[in-house]
Amino acid sequence: MVWTLALALHFFQEEAASAPAAAGSTSAIGEMIHNSGPVAFTVLLLLLLASIFSWTIMLSKWSGFRRAQMQGQRFVRAFRKSSRLSEVAAIADQFRPSPLVAVFNEIHDEYQRQNGGRGLPRNPVALERAAQTASSEALTAMESRMTWLATIAAIAPFIGLFGTVWGIIDAFHGLGTAGAATLRAVAPGISEALITTAAGLVVAIPAVIGYNQLTARLREFGSRMDDFGRELLNAIENAAMLTPTQPQPPVPTYTPVEEPPRRRAF
């Protein structure tokens, strides 16, 4: 029991000693940011704006992709339960955030233009091209602002490195002017300069992870749209084959009637 109390007291003292150290490190970082020069402060401000912009893009994309996935699953269930394309077309607008709706509308419109939505399509290749066009347009709309995310992920470390290099140059210039070649004289300037590199990495790493995750989701949406387009084409062909054909009226046959021979009158 005594040993247990002693160990608990020892751990409590260690935690109490580490807490001021953590607070001191936090205050030291804040002090270094506060004492940064105009160039370093400008770099930190740019990185802050880039971080806010990248997180805004990532959160909006994740929210939009989540809605598109949920509506797509509901639309596929409604499509597979229905037996007529006209019924699906009537409720397709309810699942508008899903890119599958655009693929369905493009194929359905092309099918209506070809033969009024009945029978086998006269040009199945045109339906496939319509599905590919709709899929490409939907992916292009979903990829909007993704280039900004990739740009931020690529250039944020270099912006931070620029601030670090400028800060080191400024620190060594001040060291040469003062003439005191000691580590204590140059260390504060270098530590303040390294803050920008750390800030650049903090901005770039989440942007890289978010860009890779969103790109993987876009590839998944593209595969789903291609699969749904093929499923819709198969459903159209199967429905056209199962539709009974209307009996054609018999073609009347012509039977020549023998005329009586004409008599010549004298």
Image (cartoon, rainbow, N blue to C red):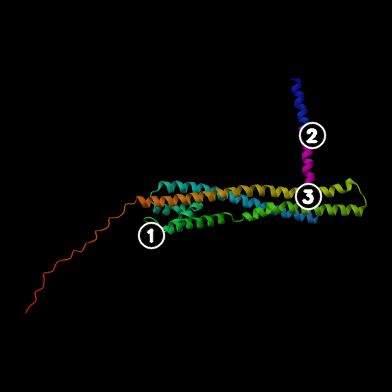
* Residue 149 image position (x, y, % from top left): 65, 53
Gap in angstroms between the C-alphas marked 2 and 1:
82 Å
Crowdedness of circle 3 by 10 Å Cα count: few (<14), some, many (20+)? Answer: some
* Residue 239 image position (x, y, % from top left): 38, 51
Taking the spot 79% from the left edge, 34% from the top edge, the residue there is 17
Q: Secondary structure at mark 2?
A: helix
Gap in angstroms between the C-alphas marked 3 and 1:
70 Å
Q: Earlier in the sequence, mark 3 or mark 1?
A: 3
Residue closest to the far left: 266
Q: Is residue 33 left or right of residue 152?
A: right
Q: Earlier in the sequence, mark 3 or mark 2?
A: 2
* Residue 262 image position (x, y, % from top left): 10, 73
Q: Which residue is mark 1?
A: 115
Q: Which residues are magenta?
A: 15-31
Q: Tag on residue 33?
A: 3
Gap in angstroms between the C-alphas marked 3 and 2:
25 Å
The amino acid marked with disc number 3 is Ile
Residue 259: name its quadrant.
bottom left
> Closer to the observer: label 2 or label 1?
1
Crowdedness of circle 2 by 10 Å Cα count: few (<14), some, many (20+)? Answer: few
Provide the major secondary structure of the magenta segment: helix
Residue 23 seen in this snapshot: yes
Q: Is residue 243 left or right of residue 26?
A: left
Q: Is residue 164 magenta?
A: no
Quadrant containing the N terminus in the rendered view: top right
Q: Which residue is mark 2?
A: 17
Q: Secondary structure at mark 3?
A: helix
* Residue 107 image position (x, y, % from top left): 45, 56
Q: Is residue 16 magenta?
A: yes
Residue closest to the far top: 1
